Amino acid sequence: MAALSILDLVRVTQNTDARGALDNARDLAAHAETWGYRRFWVAEHHNMPGIASAATSIVIAHIAAGSQTIRVGAGGIMLPNHAPLIIAEQFGTLARLFPGRIDLGLGRAPGTDQVTVQALRRQPTAADTFPQDVLELQAYFAPAGPGQRVQAVPAAGTNVALWILGSSLFGAYLAAELGLPYAFASHFAPEQLLPALEIYRSRFKPSEQLDRPHAMVGVNIVAAETDREAKVLATTQQMSFANLARGARQLSQPPIEDIETYWSPREKAQAMQMLARSIIGSPETVRTGLKALIDETAADEVMIVSDIYDHALRLRSFEIIADAHKMGAELQLCAER
């Protein structure tokens, strides 16, 4: 059975400040481990008032301290924004604080707009050395060698689990070449999902970290007691994507009854293209949609975004998703007997 994991956006809403968003993420992780989710990731985004996870390693520490068993990590760190040594120091420290629980997903996009890229002091060619930077980072997590002059203290020997993230085919080729697990961002860039998975699996080379391919698929799921309720709750995320199309960076907004009153035809087309693989509905709708996604992609793991405005309703969504997935697995076992 494919494992379920969570990508949390650490959303700042119109009635929840950044501290509230951080505490909600921590609370969700504590619940998620009791529902059977494998890992809980947050992502590096900059200059976005509605997302509180810019200082990603610090956010991970806050979440990990409030949970016991669930793996916590970055989905991901935008490595060209940083010196690999600094990231190794940060995540090596996390690995010492929370041994066996830290993941480090790596992406090469800036995680922001071009004006903010300049503020980050990121060079225009920074992404060109991404493969070499991944290897450098990996070396810092390995045991220190004799005479090694530069060490990422206290990272050496922690062997933090690395992942390659991608929304195009580049990451698939790189993850396969390096023998690393691969996570595809089909929750916002679904078009190349299937070609990327085929490339990753067909070209995979075993490594010390991984002996066979491990593919994770991102998906937006909004679950509620009924299809209608879920469709209303999903308008929060739909408005966020419409705002992106407008170049407006706003706080998360409460759901509305009719999304057609909010977006233009162009904004709708752009948003729905990005959200094409979303699953929205009742427990039965979610069970059916999740099974279809796993059957189609043969995913080893599904990473779920459930971008719901109200924290209690978001908790309930993730609980429904976990229960629906377990029910699907039980039905499949019964059918095979």
Image: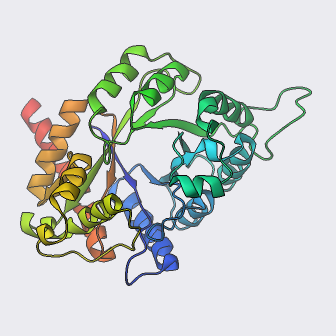
- Depth order, front residue of 130/247: 247
Count of numbered badges drawn on the protein: 0
**Residue 260, percent across and down?**
12, 67
Rendered residue at 66%/33% (across/down): 133
Residue at coordinates 13% horizontally, 72% vertically from top-left? 261
Left or right of 163 on screen, residue 287: left
Residue 202 % position (x, y)? 37, 15
Give residue 25's position: percent from left, percent from top.
Answer: 45, 67
Would you say residue 3 is visible in this rendering? yes
Q: Nearer the viewer, residue 188 or 5?
A: 188
Give the residue drawn at x 53%, y 68%.
Answer: 66
Q: Is residue 329 visible?
A: no
Tell which residue pokes out farthest to the bottom in this image: 15
Q: How is the image coloured?
A: rainbow
**Quarter holding the N terminus?**
top left
The image quadrant where one finds the C terminus is top left
184 to 28, vertically: above or below: above
**Residue 86 point in image, percent of width and height:** 73, 48
Looking at the image, residue 150 sits to the left or right of residue 318; the answer is: right
- Quarter of image, res 84: top right
Establish if 63 lies above or below 102: below
